[in-house]
Amino acid sequence: MRDPARVFSLFVRKAMSDPKPLTCSALVFVIVLAAAGSASVPRNEAGRPAWTVTYVANEGFLIATPGGKILCDALFGGITGDWCDQPSAETVEMLKGAAGPFAGVSVVTVSHAHADHFDPHFLVAHILHNPGVRVFCPNQARAVLERDPAWERIKANVFAVTPDQGRDETFEAGPIRVRVLRVDHGPYLEDDPTTKERVNRHRDVENLAFVLEVGGMRMLHGGDASPASSGSLRGYLAGDERLDLAFLDRAFCAPAGTEIVVRDIRPDILVYMHIRPGDAPKFRGCVDASRAGAPELVLFEKPGDVRMFPMK
Ligand SMILES: [Zn+2]
Ligand SMILES: [Zn+2]
């Protein structure tokens, strides 16, 4: 396997600070497919190439593109509690075994090392069954993976990067361009029992957002970024890059969040994620569709749901 950091002369650039307004065009149509197996044929009904997105669980998605499959935040499961969707035991087996719709994945992204996004054992198993895969993750996730007995066998597949604040790094993994952004995890505020001070328990979590581009389509996956950390997102996305799809935490479903989406992120299609089981319909009214520049809002209601997005 070739190292994407060598294929592509790695470049790092400063976030831009002068946003240019862009006009968003509406989603032409969305087709709900009958079965997840259809994800292996990424063409729309007119025979044009398309991206097929399968909801795995929580922030986990499989994106099948004509240039290869991408798996974001999907290798997890079996965690305590019912506060987020989780992949079924059958799906977990397919994820670990790189089987069924998860066969032949080209790129895996891990936004951060929380258990509802990343299980190191599942990821190691997937790599061992899919030795051509390239995994992009923060250094904190790599530190966990290094403790696995199979680390020596999989380390060539793992590209760990945690850019400094305001910086980004871009890799080319075959036809898939992977731009890694550093965007803080949403805050989790608690009173410290010792000092009685209000502290953000997630302040040291390395959360990455990814801009993934292949075949002229471009998507953003924000991990657990929230409107509170959107200042850096705004800087990163201030160029003239049009986003076809943006996957964002449900925290963006608030007046401040939708303002950031419409004004700064400007995707054609918006997907809210990290939604409690059964709660997806509650998010339907988050975006005022009549507003100029408003994205098409798409909500995945249950694991295994599949939608196809045609290329422009
Ligand atoms: Zn998290
Ligand atoms: Zn999370």
Image (tube, rainbow, N blue to C red):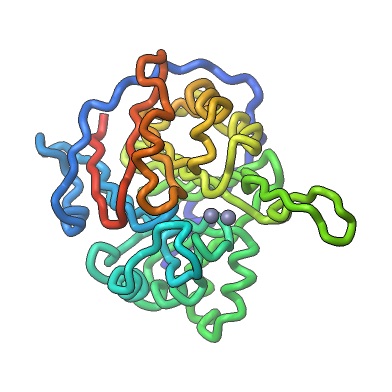
Front-most of residues 301 and 99: 301
Task: Write the residue at 33% across / 61% down.
Answer: 105
Left or right? Give the position of 81 relative to 167.
left
304 versus 50 height, above or below: below
Q: Which quadrant does the C terminus fall into? A: top left
- The x and y percentages for residue 235 are 62, 30
Task: Write the residue at 10% across / 38% down.
Answer: 45
Q: Residue furthest bottom?
A: 149
- The x and y percentages for residue 156 are 51, 71
Front-most of residues 138 and 78: 78
261 versus 65 height, above or below: above
Left or right? Give the position of 120 relative to 227.
left
Task: Write the residue at 40% across / 41% down.
Answer: 213
In which quarter of the view is residue 160 placed? bottom right
Q: Residue furthest left?
A: 46
Left or right? Give the position of 87 relative to 158.
left
156 versus 117 height, above or below: below
- The x and y percentages for residue 5 are 53, 56
Q: Which quadrant does the N terminus fall into? A: bottom left
In which quarter of the view is residue 294 placed? top left
Residue 118 shows up from this direction: yes
Residue 173 shows up from this direction: no
- The x and y percentages for residue 143 are 64, 70
Front-most of residues 198 and 303: 198
Task: Write the residue at 41% across / 15% down.
Answer: 291
